[in-house]
Amino acid sequence: MTRPKANFLISAEKLSQCPEYNLPEFALIGRSNVGKSSFINALADNKKLAKTSNIPGKTRLINFFNFDDKIIIADLPGYGYAKLSRELQEKWQKNLEEYLLKRESIKYLIQFIDARHEIQKNDLQMREWINAYKLPVITVLTKIDYVPKNKVLQTINNAKKVLGNDVYPFSTKDKKYNQEILDFLYAD
């Protein structure tokens, strides 16, 4: 597949502000700084498409990206970032919950897990919530290039065992994983 033509569309704070498209939507969820924005940039081969930061909690809105007029990728604020006021955390949680449960165009949730670490408690809690609502989900293991080569398969298999779904390794440095993910996203 050739490099996708991707562009930023709009940001929304809550479901009522989300744009309507007749395209399948993939919602990216994961802890702050797990690599969701870097994932978008790597797939699009454009380092400036989605804003990235070393400071957790920078994504505060749902950011929509169009890929080839075939799919929409929605980058959601990260969970597990504690330096926000309780009031703001509760507002985000309410808005994101409404979006995830009522947005009809969502084809899959893509939960991002940092491959360098054991699966975190808040990742497991998010997965329990997703499973409780029977939402379709896959897992992307980010920063897989930091895992020793002889442990990559073990890391992937462990994530499959713990989370019980398809797991895709991913690295912004090593583009060899991009095609498999793009094939999944673009599948009818």
Image (cartoon, rainbow, N blue to C red):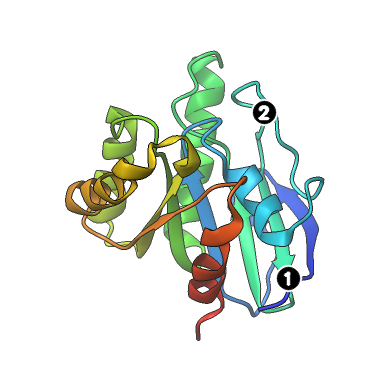
Q: Label 1 amino acid?
A: Pro
Q: Position of residue 144 (x, y in %)?
A: 45, 43
Q: Earlier in the sequence, mark 1 or mark 2?
A: 1
Task: Examine the image and state in which quarter residue 166 appears.
Answer: bottom left
Q: Secondary structure at mark 2?
A: loop
Side of 106 where 46 appears, left or right: right
Please indicate, yes or no, whether residue 7 appears anywhere in the rendered image: yes
Question: Which residue, given by chain and number where applicable, does mark 2 sit on?
Answer: 58
Decide: is 32 above or below 152. above
Residue name at image x 74 percent, y 57 percent: 45
Q: Label 2 amino acid?
A: Lys
Q: Secondary structure at mark 1?
A: loop
Q: Which mark is residue 55?
A: none
Instruction: Identify which residue, 114 or 131, lies in the foreground.
Output: 114
Please indicate, yes or no, whether residue 17 appears anywhere in the rendered image: no
Residue name at image x 75 percent, y 39 percent: 51
Q: Residues within 10 Å of mark 2 (few under 14, many from 20)?
A: some
Decide: is 138 above or below 41. below
Side of 75 where 94 appears, left or right: left
Question: Which residue, given by chain and number where applicable, does mark 1 sit on?
Answer: 4
Q: Position of residue 107 (x, y in %)?
A: 47, 71
Instruction: Identify which residue, 55 or 135, lies in the foreground.
Output: 55
Decide: is 1 above or below 121. below
Residue name at image x 54 percent, y 13 percent: 83
The quarter of the rendered structure image containing the N terminus is: bottom right
